[in-house]
Amino acid sequence: MTLSIRNQLPGTVTTITPGEVMATVGIRLTGGQTLTAAITLEAVTELGLAPGSAVRALVKSTEVALATGPVEGLSIRNQLPGTVTDLATGGAMASVKLSVDGGSLTAAVTREAVEDLALTVGSRAVALIKSTEVSLATA
């Protein structure tokens, strides 16, 4: 299967915390960072997830926000630091590619956000991703 989702990060399941309908799944990415995905219990079962399972975390570029450093006092659990390696801006939107330990992430943000954050190739940035926006696929 080929997907249009550009952000595909390989990792290993470390924890599964079930709730009534949803579960949080802790993942250690190949670069060593941790990521949390909030998925349905049905998906956990269908994917056969357990600690040690190899997975690929999938995140649409439109669901990646950027900051110039770590952010405190925020409900977003996933904060991956990186370096801007590519930047393409248009009239309204921009595509920002970050190199993170173990891979890369692309964020689709407004051109104004890029300007306000003064992002350029070589800038440090932090990708912010809500756990509910992380999908999982078995590797």
Image (cartoon, rainbow, N blue to C red):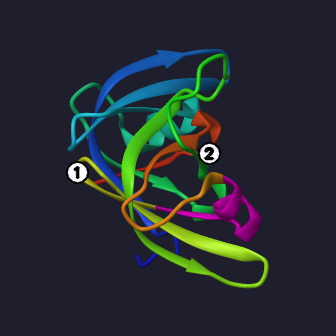
Tell me where residue 116 appears, x and y as whole percent: 70, 55
* Label of residue 133 in the image: 2
Q: At which x and y percent is residue 46?
A: 46, 42
Q: Quadrant of residue 74?
A: top right
Task: Kindly report the distance in space between the C-alpha atoms of the residues bearing marks 2 and 1.
Answer: 20 Å
Circle 2 packing at 10 Å, graded few (<14), some (14-19), many (20+), is some
Quarter of the view holding residue 2: bottom left
Q: Residue at x 27, y 25 (%)?
A: 51
Q: Amino acid at mark 2?
A: Glu
Residue that appears at 58% across and 27% down: 71
All told, the count of numbered labels is: 2
Residue 55 position in % (x across, y down): 31, 46
| Kind of residue sitting beneath label 1 | Gly
- What are the residue bounds of the magenta stretch? 106-116
Q: Is residue 110 magenta?
A: yes
- Residue closer to the observer: 34 or 138: 34
Local packing at callout 1 (Cα closer than 10 Å; few below 14, some 14-19, many 20+) is few
Q: Position of residue 132 (x, y in %)?
A: 63, 38
Tell me if residue 30 comes above or below residue 107 in the rendering: above
Q: Is residue 132 above or below residue 124?
A: above
Residue 54 located left or right of residue 124: left
Disc ID at residue 128: none
Q: Nearer the viewer, residue 100 or 121?
A: 121
Helix, strand, or loop for circle 1? Answer: loop
Residue depicted at x 42% and y 40%:
80
Q: Is residue 63 magenta?
A: no
Q: Where residue 102 is drawn, which disc sits there?
A: 1
**Res 139 quadrant in image:** bottom left
